[in-house]
Amino acid sequence: MDDLDMLPMAQRKYGLDIVEPRQWPRDGGARREPVYDPNFEPPRLVRLVGWRSCMCCGDLFFSSDVRRQRLHPEGCTYQYI
Ligand SMILES: [Zn+2]
């Protein structure tokens, strides 16, 4: 593994996996964990992971992309009265 890592990025014949952060306890959206794609030099920021409030019901959920995923991923259960 180490000798393969010595190759410049453009000469590698394999891709590096994106490391997904594990979910952490609710913090009200204070912490944002960056997800990098290590196949770029320098590594490219793909998205930010963290807790955010749902645009529909306002409840917190763990979002794999805090900018794009703004509603409960499994469907919001909020009921309009
Ligand atoms: Zn919701």
Image: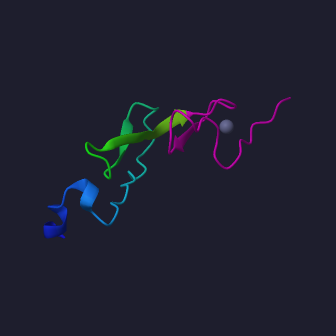
Q: Is residue 9 above or below residue 14?
A: above
Q: Is residue 55 left or right of residue 7?
A: right
The image quadrant that residue 17 belongs to is bottom left
Q: Quadrant of the N terminus?
A: bottom left
Question: Could you tell me what secondary structure mostly forms the magenta stretch?
Answer: loop
Q: Is residue 32 above or below residue 24?
A: above
Pick the residue in front: 42 or 66: 42
Magenta span contains residue 42: no
Q: Residue furthest front?
A: 11
Image location of residue 51, percent across then percent down? 48, 38
Q: Quadrant of the C terminus?
A: top right
Q: Residue at left 80%, top 35%?
A: 79
Image location of residue 8, percent across then percent down? 20, 56
Image location of residue 77, percent across then percent down? 74, 42
Q: Is residue 9 left or right of residue 31?
A: left
Q: Is residue 30 left or right of residue 10?
A: right
The image quadrant that residue 13 belongs to is bottom left
Q: Residue at left 62%, top 33%?
A: 54
Q: Residue furthest right?
A: 81
Q: Is residue 73 above or below residue 60?
A: below
Pick the residue in front: 49 or 5: 5
Image location of residue 7, percent across then percent down? 18, 61
Numbered range of the magenta stretch: 53-81
Pick the residue in front: 57 or 5: 5
Magenta span contains residue 68: yes
Q: Residue at left 52%, top 32%?
A: 67
Q: Residue at left 34%, top 42%?
A: 44
